[in-house]
């Protein structure tokens, strides 16, 4: 009996991998640490995606679901919860007992071969070490492994050096720091208080938009938005030049909140410490000595990073900056990204020195942002073809990614940029706020 392909994670890409493999006659085994499929998506279920429905459904998954009468929505932008209810949960049910929940992968290796052993390595199956909720450990052998575990559980910290800020863990434990986007109800609980958002990407922009509504309703509310870079750079996205209309609109709505004075944008703010106050608030201090007024909550939305801890016995080839596969990193590096530079990636770009092992989904971007579901669907389509021996289909690119409309990288790191246009669109006109040393 041929061994299965183990897929780590039953999120959008993991479930799509299962559908793609089955369509190729390959048996998948999908291991999910959460208690349900798409458990990570459920944690941000209130957030609306900026990809439309046609880009959120994998082609093989649609072919699997259609015979049961299921129909893919033709338009609209679902929330995470709607994505689960309409598509991801039905797909998990269709895959049946090939999806096993409550099973955490704690190690992957070659059977009988640690990282240092060359002899006969490629001929040995993979062994996947798992642990369930009761602490029971087991081993599963696999012909190949697809890591679609994502990055949701490894949010990047507030500290500007990539380490946690002083006092950050204590503030998290006290419930004063969150690494997620607030929903409408939570945002309203901060009426009349001070809230801080740290981060530069789409999650930060979404939080800013939500909190700005509270400021409109309750003018006594204050929101401070902290960027590490000396200029806003691509913080507000490509606007009308973005080929994903809702992604472009997201940045422009955040920019409007700044322009209207609903949010105080502070650039070059590199968080050094988070200090708890005796009245249950938190004070944010920058490396340059700036100190913010006490805040009721700090939302740290500084991106995510891959968890590589369970891959210590797998031979990986990762970019030293982004911790992404080298050929993928060259496409998504935010230090050099420019208009139209991102292309779809497949089995060839996702391969490692360990034959038969692939990292897909958001984790394939390492620390880089802006991963799209359809990117992951193309990845798993190509890998399934490669594992089935259809090298022509694996090499074929069946996706053109939408242009972000963003140019010139993510902004100067140490100084404000001159107020000049970029290569795609005029530069946003920002209100620059001076340093504050409020007690």
Image (cartoon, rainbow, N blue to C red):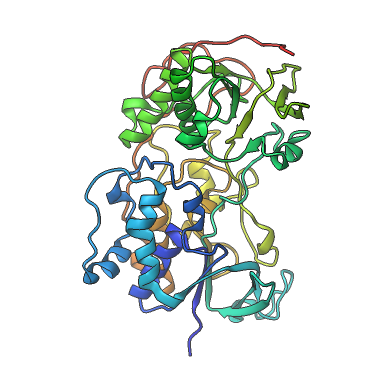
| Residue 302, quarter of picture | top right
- The answer to which of 142 and 396 lies nearer the viewer is 142
Residue 439, given in percent of the width and then of the height, sits at: 74, 13
* Res 164 seen here: no
Q: Residue at x 42, y 62 (%)?
A: 380
- Viewer-side residue, 189 vs 428: 189
Q: Please state the horizontal and vertical placement of residue 97, each as a whole percent of the image.
A: 45, 77
* Picture residue at 72% right of the left edge, 22% below the top: 286
Q: Can residue 437 be seen in this view?
A: yes
Q: Is residue 381 above or below residue 52?
A: below
Residue 324 to residue 203: above or below: below
Q: Is residue 202 above or below residue 421?
A: below
Residue sitting at x 40%, y 32%:
339
Vertical position of residue 161 compared to residue 371: above or below = above
Residue 210: give x, y in percent of width and height. 46, 29
Foreground pick, 80 / 266:
80
């Amino acid at each position: 009996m041929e061994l299965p392909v183990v897929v780590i994670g039953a999120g959008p890409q993991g479930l799509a991998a299962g559908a793609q493999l089955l369509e190729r006659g390959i048996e998948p085994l999908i291991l999910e640490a959460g208690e349900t499929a798409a458990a990570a998506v459920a944690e941000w279920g209130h957030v609306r995606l900026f990809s439309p429905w046609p880009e959120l459904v994998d082609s093989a998954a649609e072919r699997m679901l259609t015979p049961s009468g299921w129909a893919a929505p033709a338009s609209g932008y679902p929330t995470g919860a709607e994505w689960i209810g309409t598509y991801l949960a039905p797909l998990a049910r269709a895959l049946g007992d090939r999806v096993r929940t409550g099973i955490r992968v704690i190690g992957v290796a070659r059977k009988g071969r640690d990282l240092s052993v060359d002899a006969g390595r490629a001929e040995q199956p993979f062994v996947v070490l798992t642990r369930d909720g009761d602490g029971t450990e087991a081993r599963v052998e696999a012909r190949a492994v697809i890591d679609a575990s994502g990055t949701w559980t490894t949010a990047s910290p507030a500290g500007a050096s990539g380490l946690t800020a002083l006092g950050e863990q204590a503030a998290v434990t006290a419930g004063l720091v969150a690494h997620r986007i607030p929903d409408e109800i939570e945002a309203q609980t901060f009426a009349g208080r001070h809230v801080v958002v740290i981060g530069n990407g789409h999650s930060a922009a979404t939080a800013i938009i939500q909190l700005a509504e509270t400021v409109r309703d309750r003018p006594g509310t204050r929101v401070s938005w902290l960027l590490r870079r000396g200029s806003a750079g691509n913080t507000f996205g490509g606007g009308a030049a973005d080929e994903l209309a809702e992604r472009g609109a997201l940045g422009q709505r955040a920019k409007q909140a700044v322009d209207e004075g609903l949010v105080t944008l502070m650039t070059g703010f590199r968080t050094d410490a988070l200090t708890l106050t005796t009245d249950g608030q938190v004070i944010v201090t920058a490396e340059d000595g700036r100190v913010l007024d006490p805040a009721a909550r700090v939302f740290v939305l500084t991106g995510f990073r891959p968890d590589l801890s369970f891959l210590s016995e797998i031979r990986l080839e990762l970019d030293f900056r982004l911790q992404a596969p080298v050929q993928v990193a060259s496409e998504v590096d935010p230090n050099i990204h420019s208009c139209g530079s991102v292309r779809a990636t497949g089995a060839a770009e996702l391969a490692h020195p360990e034959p038969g092992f692939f990292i897909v989904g958001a984790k394939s971007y390492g620390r880089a942002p802006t991963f799209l579901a359809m990117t992951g669907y193309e990845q798993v389509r190509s890998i399934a073809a490669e594992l089935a021996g259809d090298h022509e289909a694996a090499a074929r690119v069946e996706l053109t990614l939408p242009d972000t409309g963003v140019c010139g990288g993510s902004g100067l790191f140490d100084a404000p940029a001159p107020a000049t246009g970029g290569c795609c669109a005029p530069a946003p006109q920002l209100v620059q706020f001076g340093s504050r040393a409020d007690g």
